[in-house]
Amino acid sequence: MLLECDSATIRDLRNALVREGLVRIRHERGDKQRQMLALSPKGRRLAEKLQALDAQIAAVLDDAIESNAPHLKTELARAVAALDGMALAERLSG
C-alpha cells in the first residue's frame, strides 16, 4: 500500500519528526535537495516500544481468535473499549 500525499504534507511530517527528536536529516553531498532521514536514538527507542506493543496486541488477538472465535466480535469490541480512553503516548510511557 502506498501513502499518497503532497510534498507539503511530507515536509510538515518530516519537520514534526525532527522537532520531536525522532529523526535526523542528512543531506547528500553535492545535492542539497536530496535528504536522507534516519531514526535518532530517541526514535529507535520509540520504534522498539511500538514493536513491543504490536507484538502484545497480536498475541492478545491470536489468543482471542483461538479461544473465543465464536465471540470474536464481542472480544474485539471489548479490546477497543479498553484502549479507547488511552492515548498512544500513555500506552507507550509505561
Image: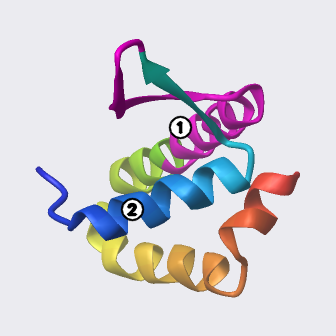
Are there few (<14), some (14-19), or many (20+) residues within 10 Å of tag 2?
some
Q: Position of residue 45 (x, y in %)?
A: 74, 31
- Tell me the magenta residue range: 29-57
Q: Position of residue 23 (x, y in %)?
A: 61, 37
- Furthest-top residue in view? 29
Give the residue at mark 2: 68
Q: Position of residue 33 (x, y in %)?
A: 32, 36
Vertical side of 56 occupied by 12: above or below: below
Give the residue at mark 1: 55
Give whichever of 90, 69 is nearer the camera. 90
Which quadrant would residue 75 be assigned to in this image? bottom left
Q: Is residue 89 left or right of residue 12?
A: right
Vertical side of 24 occupied by 63: above or below: below
Vertical side of 45 occupied by 9: above or below: below
**What's the amino acid at mark 2?**
Asn
Give whichever of 54, 9 is nearer the camera. 9
Report how far apart the C-alphas of labels 1 and 2 lie in the structure.
19 Å
Q: Nearer the viewer, mark 1 or mark 2?
A: 1
